[in-house]
Image (spheres, grey):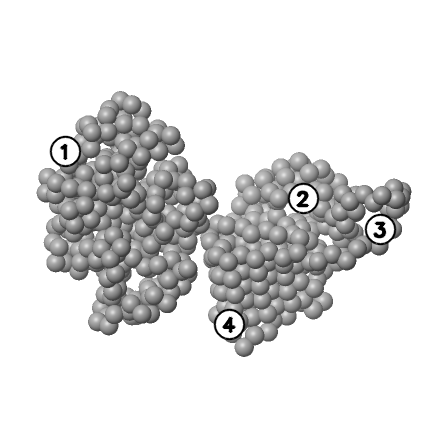
Amino acid sequence: MGKVVVVTSGKGGVGKTTSAAALGAALAQRKEKTVVVDFDVGLRNLDLVMGAERRVVYDLVNVIQGEAKLAQALIRDKRLETLYLLPASQTRDKDNLTAEGVERVIGALKKTFDWVICDSPAGIERGATLAMRHADVAVVVTNPEVSSVRDSDRIIGLIDAKTAKAERGERMDRHLLLTRYNPNRAERGDMLSVEDVLEILSIPLLGIVPESMDVLRASNIGMPVTLADSQSAPAQAYLQAARRLAGEDVPISIPGEKRSLLGKLFGWRAA
Amino acid sequence: MALALSPELPLGDWLHQLDDLAARSAGFFLRRPVVLDIEGLQISRPELKEFIDELSRRNVRVIGIEGARPSLLGADMPPAMSGGRATQDIEEPIAEAAAAAPDSGGSEPAPAGQPEPQPVRPVPSMIIDQPVRSGQSVIFPEGDITIIASVASGAEVVAGGSIHVYGALRGRAMAGSMGNASARIFCSKLEAELLAIDGLYKTAEDIEPHLRGRAVHLWLDGDAIKTETLN
């Protein structure tokens, strides 16, 4: 059975879709069969970021409503044969996602894929709660600024209360992915520090992705940043985050600082 | 400081006056905590609920209700505040407890105003060992709340007794919410948005800057909230 990961944040524009695509591609680069599912019905973007916008025929809503088979809606990436995309519908709205339908699709995907990455829409409404509902692991994407941190805190509360796992009395693993981190601004105090964010959210850190033009450039050419230039700093951060997600023990370093913060960060890990 | 509103009947006219005031000074109620004083006001529970909804439609944030009989208040309403005065109705839960455990003697219920001598009962408490996250409310009118984690900005903790936070207190804490002037608030790191004991409150702006980020203890001395650092 594959693992279901939800990439979520509460706030919009923090880098959920970019991160879902980059992590999905990074896991697929490890030769693990990965599908990235776009839950942002009505405002889909994942197809653009993954460069598949011209190949979309059927989508998640078609599959849920029985108008298409799952195999017809899945799009295989042209560059990585282990990477697939399940696009969202652009013409429908989120009311077309039903709890039973989502459960059925996720259940079917889990059987054939090693990783099912759910790209959540912003907000705390239907789309977002359904995207996290059947996940095993949550990746909470946060920017180092107060409004993003507070929204992430809200989402973590919902993950702990409103998911299938929570209703069974289990605790979902939640990981923090800090994106758009700018070492210079953090040093000047214009941005929350890594430690501040970890202290407020008290969940383990999956990775720190530096703010970079490489991310924008990759999005614009329709490539996950880990595929576009695997040597760039953000790509390296995502590749390492994917290894940690897969259970490898990889030390975390804060961009702009040479020393490893592993020991320090482990001290912050929530029980 | 928070603002106290004392509505008058008929409520429709009073709301009209409020709209007038709000129209003349835009943003008057914006983000200001408001306490509703309904002492002596003859209204029913549904009317009160409707009234609070009317206020929230006007962006008036009601943080507490003063002078209300407990029977008027529900879990979906702001907590009772009593400005340091003991409310008579607070005896009600004890009367209920006595009724729930009828004794075999079958004695007549004591006349109103003379409650039976109450048995010694342990004071209940609630312990929470994970962070209280933004948007979550922890409400425990029966007694103390102890939190072995942080209370996030936008979270709310309401206790009938004292509140203990072994972590950062960034949200709201309201102790003694059912009328208890001896309730206290303790926290290891004070960054609260609002603190209230027995209906008296301080907003973030009223908290002395030197207490920010410190371990702090708050209690009530008459009508004043006293503060002291713990280390």
> In this image, B121 relative to B202: left or right?
right
Please determine if labels 2 and 4 lie on a single subunit.
Answer: yes
Which residue bears the numbered disc 2? B73
> In this image, B191 relative to B16: left or right?
left
Give, as a three-letter code, the residue at label 3: Pro
Using the numbered discs, state the Cα–Cα distance from disc 1 to disc 4 in whole angstroms. Answer: 57 Å
Tell me whether the residue at label 2 lies in contact with that at label 4, contact meaning CB atoms closer than 8 angstroms.
no
- Which of marks 4 and 2 precedes in the sequence? 2
Give, as a three-letter code, the residue at label 1: Arg
> In this image, A166 relative to A47: left or right?
right
Tell me which corner region of the image, top left, top right, bottom left or bottom right, holds residue A179. Answer: bottom left
Which residue bears the numbered disc 4? B214
- Which of marks 2 and 3 precedes in the sequence? 2
- Residue A54 is marked as 1
Q: Nearer the viewer, residue B207 or A77?
A: A77
Tell me which corner region of the image, top left, top right, bottom left or bottom right, holds residue B119. Answer: bottom right
- Residue B115 is marked as 3
Q: Position of residue A60 (x, y in %)?
A: 27, 31
Q: Residue at x 56, y 55 (%)?
A: B157
Using the numbered discs, state the Cα–Cα distance from disc 1 to disc 3 in whole angstroms. Answer: 78 Å
Tell me which corner region of the image, top left, top right, bottom left or bottom right, holds residue B194. Answer: bottom right
Q: Residue at x 62, y 52 (%)?
A: B140
